[in-house]
Image (tube, rainbow, N blue to C red):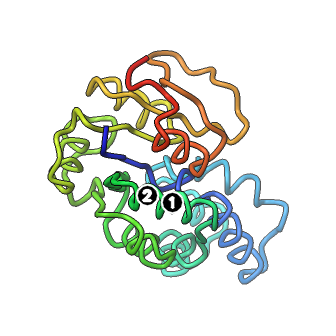
């Protein structure tokens, strides 16, 4: 195994924390109830809710200008994401020891690329694939094949690391690949394919996979 296909949002970066900060600033700027932050985070659904659904919900609830809503959804999280030092170090170590790292993420190309560049991930990975540009979303096998092509390596040589049971773990299983689920302290309760292993965060997953402490197959 020499290829790491790693999710972006809530795996390499804490997208929810960034969006929470952006949402709080949005509410404050427009003098809206601060207590609505939980409602807004629920509507957003960790970025899995369609953009138009979130936008329409905000406009219907508050009557704010569409441009303000678009700014929140387009750049709010991207402008605030940060990369943990432990994650950056684990990526650097992985590449130094011969692993090829490719980010595989669902989302809009401009937004996801901005997150990658704003955090410096563009200097720590060997490439990335965004669903909008690829024409396929995780868990579709095609996006994982596209990521392997970016790396110039066979897909069979890959581990998949991500936080989503559906997009990442089921996607890995559909390709016959081992996977690590990023739990962030959550218990595994999802139906369907189970991950090969579970790690609390991306740094822990990267370190243990690249150190060869886990078997290549369940």
Whether tag 1 and tag 2 are in contact, CB under 8 A, the answer is yes
**Image position, residue 57 (x, y; %):** 57, 57
User: What residue lies at 69% left-to-right and 64% top-to-bottom?
Assistant: 20
Determine whether 184 is above or below 106 in the image.
above
**Image position, residue 209 (x, y; %):** 48, 39
User: What residue lies at 41% left-to-right and 49% top-to-bottom?
Assistant: 6
Which is more foreground, mark 1 or mark 2?
A: 2
User: To which residue does mark 1 refer?
Assistant: 56
Residue 112 is left or right of residue 133, and the answer is right
Question: What is the secondary structure assignment of the residue under circle 2?
Answer: helix
Mark 2 neighbour density, 10 Å: few (under 14) some (14–19) many (20 or more): few
Which quadrant holds the C terminus?
top left
User: To which residue does mark 2 refer?
Assistant: 52
Which quadrant holds the N terminus?
top left
Query: Which quarter of the figure has residue 79?
Result: bottom right
**Image position, residue 126 (x, y; %):** 30, 63
Residue 18 is left or right of residue 194, and the answer is right
Question: What is the secondary structure assignment of the residue under circle 1?
Answer: helix
User: What residue lies at 72% left-to-right and 77% top-to-bottom?
Assistant: 25
CA gap between label 1 and label 2 equals: 6 Å
Query: How many numbered discs sit on the rendered protein?
Result: 2
Query: Which quarter of the figure has residue 62?
Result: bottom right
């Amino acid at each position: 195994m020499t290829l790491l296909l790693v999710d972006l949002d809530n795996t390499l970066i804490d997208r929810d924390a960034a969006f929470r900060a952006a949402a709080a600033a949005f509410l404050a700027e427009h003098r809206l109830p601060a207590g609505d932050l939980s409602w807004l985070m629920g509507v957003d659904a960790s970025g899995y809710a369609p953009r138009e659904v979130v936008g329409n919900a905000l406009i219907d609830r508050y009557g704010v200008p569409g441009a303000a809503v678009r700014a929140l959804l387009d750049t709010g999280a991207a402008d605030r994401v940060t990369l943990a030092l432990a994650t950056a170090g684990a990526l650097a170590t992985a590449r130094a020891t011969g692993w090829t790292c490719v980010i595989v993420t669902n989302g809009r190309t401009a937004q996801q690329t901005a997150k990658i560049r704003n955090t410096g991930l563009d200097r720590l990975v060997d490439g990335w694939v965004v669903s909008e540009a690829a024409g396929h979303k995780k868990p579709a096998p095609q996006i994982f094949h596209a990521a392997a092509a970016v790396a110039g390596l066979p897909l069979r040589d890959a581990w998949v690391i991500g936080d989503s049971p559906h997009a990442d773990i089921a996607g890995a299983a559909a390709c016959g690949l081992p996977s690590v689920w990023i739990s962030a302290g959550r218990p595994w309760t999802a139906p369907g394919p189970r991950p090969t292993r579970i790690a609390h965060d991306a740094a822990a997953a990267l370190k243990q996979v690249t150190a060869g402490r886990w078997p290549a197959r369940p």
